[in-house]
Amino acid sequence: MIGIEDATRTVLSRSRNWGDEFVPLTEALGRVLKEPLLADRDFPPYTRVTMDGIAIDFRSYAAGQRSFPIQGLQAAGSPQMELKNPEHCLEVMTGAVLPKGTDTVIPYEEVELRDGVAIVIPDSFKQGKNAHLQGLNRKQGDLIVSSGKWISAAELGVAATVGKTELKVATLPTVCIITTGDELVEVNETPLPHQIRKSNAYSVQALLRMYGIESDLRHIYDEREEIRRVLSACLEQYDILVLSGGVSKGKLDFIPGVLEELGVEKLFHRVKQRPGKPFWFGESRERNTVVFALPGNPVSSFMCTRRYLMPFLHKSLSGQEAPPQYARLAEPFTFKPDLTYFLQVSLKSTAEGVLLAHPVPGKGSGDLANLCDAEAFLELPAGREHFEAGESFRLWGFRPLKN
Ligand code: AMP
Ligand code: MG
C-alpha cells in the first residue's frame, strides 16, 4: 500500500501526449491550444473612436474655441475621413476610425448641436480623450495567447479577432469505461431484489466530459475468461481504460490478475486513502495504454476519477500540472484511521474572500446520494486525527461554475 503522494507522482509521471489536431473555432472551447495566437494586426488596428460625438483638432479647443461647424459624419465601417479645417469638427460614431486631422473626441453628452454647429460645454477637456490609440493594447506580431493554454471564452474572442477559423488543439484520448459486477443492471431495467442499476459508468463519464472527453461504456460480468477477452480487445483499442469494480480482495475480483496476465504492468495497488483504498493503476507499454482500475463503490470511483484521472488528463493535455486549490475547514473534524481522508464538503465563499468547506461526510463509500449535497472533496492528510476549523487543505471540486 502506498501513500497518496507516491500514487499521485506515479500517475502524473505516466502522462501522455496524444498529438494535435485542428478543430473549427466554434468547437474549440475547453480544449488546449497547441499553437501560439499572434496579433495579425495592431490591437486596435486603427485609432478608434470610443464615444459617439464630435472629433476635433485639440489645438483649437486649447486656444479657447468652443463652437465647431460640422464638416460631416465619420461612421463606423467607413474609410478614414479628413478634417479639412482645424476649426471645424466631424461627427464621429463609436468604432469609427478617428478622422485625419483630429485627435480628440467630445461625446454628444458634452455638446449642443445647433444649426450645423457643435457647441462644446465643458472647459476642462483633455487632449486625446475617447480615442483608443492604434496598437495601444498589442502590436502586430505580439504573442497574445501561448501554446498550451486552455481555451476559454476569452481566448475564443481573440482567435476570432485574428482570423482563425480553425485552431490547433491537443487531441483527446480515446477512453473506455468498463464496469464489472454481476449485481449490476442497465439503467432502463428494473432490478431484482439482489440487483442494482449501474451508476458509476455515468458519473465517471460525466466527470471526463468536464475535460471535453467522450468515452465508450462497456460492462463485463464477473467471469474470468470474459474479463480477459474484453480487456484484451480494449487494451488494443483505447488510450485509457477506466475500470470500475473487481479490484478488492473478493473471490471474484479478477481484474488485477487478468490485467497482469495481459501484460499490463502494475504500478501500484492499494492507496492509503479513504475512500478508494483498493485503487489499482498500471500501464501497458506495448500498447501505450494506461489503466485506472477503480474500486466499484460509487464514491470511491468518483473520488479516484476526480483526484487521479482528471489531473492525469490535465497534465497530459496541457503539459502542466493543474494548479492546486485550497479551502478552509469551516468546523473541526476528526478522522482516526491513518489514511488520507477525502472529506465531502459543501462550499461557501465569505465576503472576506475566504472559501469555507463545510463537512458533509455522508455514510461511507457506497453513499452516492451524499455526493449531491457536496461540491468538492477536502483532502485531509494521513497521520493526524484532528483537523481544526480555519485550517486550509487541498480541495478537489467537481461542480462547474455556478455564479
Ligand atoms: P467491487 O469494487 O466490485 O467490490 O464493488 C464494490 C461495491 O460497489 C459493491 O457494493 C458494488 O455493488 C458497487 N458497485 C460496483 N460497480 C458499480 C457500479 N458501476 N455502479 C454502482 N455500484 C457499483
Ligand atoms: Mg464487484
Image (cartoon, rainbow, N blue to C red):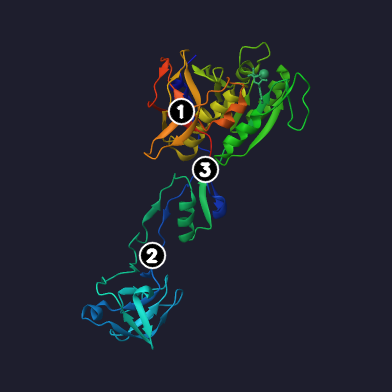
Rendering quadrant holding ligand 2: top right
Nearer to us in this view, 91 or 236: 91
Mark 3, secondary structure of its residue: loop
Q: Is residue 99 visible?
A: no
Task: Give the residue at mark 2.
Answer: 44
Viewer-side label of 3, 2: 3
Instruction: Report the side of 32 relative to 239 (left or right).
Output: left
Mark closest to the chain's N terminus, 1 or 3: 1
Which mark sits nearer the N-terminus, 1 or 2? 1
User: Disc 3 designates what residue?
Assistant: 402
Res. 48 in view:
yes
Name the residue nearer the viewer: 228 or 154.
154
What separation in Å lies between label 1 and label 2 (alpha carbons)?
43 Å
Farthest left residue in view = 63
Q: Which residue is mark 1?
A: 13
Residue 183 figure quarter: top right
Amino acid at circle 2: Pro
